[in-house]
Amino acid sequence: MSDKSYQIKENNQVMIQGGEKKVMKKILSVALSTAMAFSMFASVAFGDDALNTQQKFDVLKEKGIFTGYPDGTAGLDKDMTRAEFAKVLVGIMGLEPIEGKASFKDKNYKADKWPAPYVEAVYAAGLMEGKNTTKMIFDFNGKITVQEMAKVLVLAQKLEIPTETNNNASDWAKGYVQAAINSGLVDAKANPKANASRSQLVDVAYSIYLAQQKPAVVSYEVKEDGKVVEFKLANNEVVKVTLETALKANTATEVKFSHNNYDYTEKVTWVVTAATKIQSVAGTNYKQLVVTFDGEVDTKTATNEENYTISNVAVDSASLSADKRVVTLTLTENGNKLPQQKATNLKVNGVKNSDGSRTFNETVSFSVNDTAIPEVKTVTGLGTSAVRVQFSEPVTRLSAGNIANYRIDGKPISGTITYSYLTNSVVISTPLAVGEHTLTAEGVTDFANFKVGNASSTFSVVEDTVAPEVVSAVAKDLQTVVVTFNEPIKSVSKGYHTSTSRPATVSISDNEVTLSFTEANRLGLGETEVFLEAVSDYSNNSSNRSTKVTPVVDTERPTVVGVNAKSTDTTALTVEFSKSVKESDIQNRSNFVLKKADGTVFSGAGFTSAGNPTTAPKYATKANGTVDNTKAVLTSIGSTLPAGKYTLEISGIRDNTAFGNTMVPQTVEINVTQAGAIETTAAWYTLDSANDQYNIYVQFDRNVATSGEGNALDVNKYNYVVGSTYYPIPANASITSYTANTVVITVNKDDLNANFSDNTIAKKIRVVNVADLNGNYVNTTGSVTDLTAQEVSRVAIGDVNATGARTIVAKFKGELGYVDSRDFAINSASVPTDVYGFSVTNKGFANGETTVEFNLTKDLPANTGDVVLRTTSTSSADLHTVDNYGRKIAAVNKDVADKIKPSIVENSNGTKQVAATATEVRINFTESLKLAQTAATFVVRVNGNPVDLTDYTASVSGNQLVITLDNAAPANALLEVELKGNPDGLYLTDESGNAADNFSVSARVN
């Protein structure tokens, strides 16, 4: 009976029958754990990979693990015997040789021979059993094969045996060999059935020896969003490594670190299932865009089509792939197509990844070139009355719905077609015999006008006698339920939940039925049963179906994603929310407060003295003309907002969910830039006589780009005009920035046309392809302006407006550096002696103009058109006001335009001049009025009760607004008059068309 039969392991010792004998020196971290083996046999993991096999042998010989032959050689080219392998195994596994025993019956196997102590030790440890366990033959002089060696080493290391193998070992050994290959014990190229060489064992033994000296990496954990890796070593130490650059998700990366004087190089993969970035945006047709993420995204936000925006294109639906990584956006059927072969931006807002750790709010550029021919993807028989045809991409309704474009078994067919745009499919209703058929589609076109290839598809027809079954049902919210069936649905007679008193609007798209409930009939918060009556398929099998759904209650607050400012004639501020919000809340003007960069409230141009919009904001409009309830638009009135930085405070906005989640107040920064085509405002030149060169200055109405496609520092973008002939600026000319909105071109005098120096000939400068800092270019025809010598170049005046009773604002088309009040006079045109005193303030340069404000010492008349702003001399040479380049202003004599709003006259005590009788309310304004009344212009109340529109009339008399009641009010009654929507509607204006502010006034009957 062998000792092995009685072996038990206790306190790192082997108990043997007849007494206790210590046979192990040590156990290498639980038999050199599996995780250690994975790294310790890979030579690249250690600093000794430069040693050759002989050098490794020498190290092991010094440590007593190998002995070598009597002649001193290593015998690396020889095959390893089983006794030699046992000796090395004892050394590398830390076993104690067992002296004085001879358990095996081999010829010449004796206790006093050198192999016996080592053979007995590995036998006692259960690592080797011998060739014949019945006859107890060890075959110590026999060779050991690679697969036999692999088995012993795998068992010694307690490695996991894989279920999948890829080697040519014997069947019994495949798992052991694969485990050895996977862990680096055996080279994958080695022949498992061949004899193991001494050199192979040297390499393995040396790796094990090194592993005893240096703790191998057992495992690692990636933390802090890929910035930190914690490595666990075989000795249970944990080493924290902070990386300079965060790991890329799902990408193997080499990480190097040092610990206890050992250098480590480890391949680390940060396994992330949740998406961390948008990997790509691409389209192969003009109606669909594919957004690919690098991981999984949240189904609810990813399939919300409102979270995707493409300029001038409306998204109809967003579908998510089964692996939750790819979103396919399908545009509206009748809306615009994707731009063709043109860089276009997709804006993604509010899409979350699967674990909610990231929300994607970014813009990605893409370009689409449709070169793919549409194909018939599948053909499916729907019983004996219909066949479903699905195409590889969206096809046009007109071509797909034309039954003449289809053939079955080579023959024309008759019947009807049901077209489903979102599923790229049609259902052809036509009688079909049971059996195999062939369908051909011709003439069906996609949205690039490519026709379906003329290919035939076979399909089978079997009789269908079973009514449609519900596959799934999802409550998208409290008002929408989508029920998916196992086949396309032809019709549903009725849909409702709980009872027929809560009906739904039913819509069908292929095999999906959508039930839309009104707010009054919305689902409950718990489980709700929905019913569909007479659900019919295309074989006319019909049945009533019901299913239960439980809405997921949305408790997430809306947030502001961003605010976009766009200026044309006015400025539109579009506030984008993370989700749909209530219209009543965005129409509440007090929920929005606009402030200037310095924190003070902005007023004017459609905003009240409190910074609230004077007209109610409204939903934005999508490209397809429908409202976008995730966006609110605030619009300035009468003019654009001045360019600059602002903040918009937003509060009190609720979403459209059942609970009306209210946003946390937010303050968002806005940068309003000048819009529209950039223009040149002035051009002049000076002669540098010393260098015989001209310096040509070109001034723009705003700061210009100095790099990129719109670079203003490209001399090839400028021409000069002498008379009527255009000449290019010579190529050897230089161009530099003079100021942010002005460039100077230096050119040799002799390189210009000879007539350039003739001041009697008109000259111009023409500029093309120059842009401002926001990408606004000059018009396609270029921007042309007069070019004169600096000494005769003048800064022209622009608009001159009266903006208040004692305020006139003048715009000069240049950057004035000095304004001299002595250069100006303001007086009545009809009575020149009627002069206005004033002080003058330079309000600064913006948008190509300098604003100069004149503050008067007395009120302007109601008709400001009789007032002129003029210079005190008709010769610019006598004036002192100049721009920063030394150019003087042009002589001025300009009428003052009336831009003063009519307002209600106030008494000295601050009350408004409003008088009421039993039948009349009179309101005094500061100037004569015009009335363009509509039915809803005014709201009139008597003692708080609204007066019907037909029971009063409104009129103006000079500077009075008169409200006349058909029915006399009682004595001491409170009469109220309210004007709404006037800045937009222009119902009540002065003679110049300036709209009065909205108002609400009251007075008691005298």
Image (tube, grey):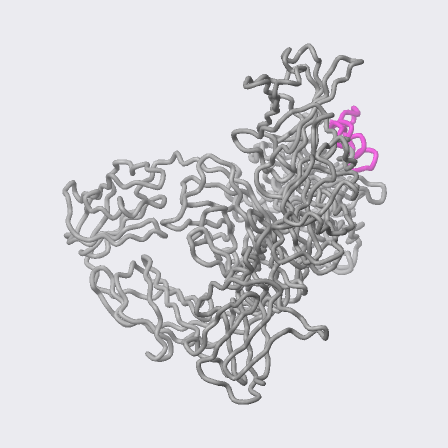
Q: Residue at image x 20%, y 60%? A: 539
Question: Percent position (x, y) of residue 708?
Answer: 63, 31
**Is 52 included in the stretch rendered in magenta?**
yes
Quarter residue 726 falls in: top right
Q: Is residue 6 visible?
A: no
In the rendered image, the quadrant that contains the N terminus is bottom right
**Is 938 included in the stretch rendered in magenta?**
no
Question: Percent position (x, y) of residue 783?
Answer: 58, 30
- Please name whichever residue, 76 or 222, is drawn nearer the observer in this view of the structure: 222
User: Which residues make up the magenta segment?
Assistant: 49-74
Does 242 sit left or right of 325 as displayed? right
Q: Is residue 537 visible?
A: yes
Q: Main secondary structure of the magenta part?
A: loop
Question: Percent position (x, y) of residue 599?
Answer: 74, 58
- Please name whichever residue, 44 or 843, is drawn nearer the observer in this view of the structure: 843
In the rendered image, the quadrant that contains the C terminus is bottom right
Does 824 sit left or right of 938 as displayed? right
Instruction: Tell which residue pokes out farthest to the right in this image.
Output: 261
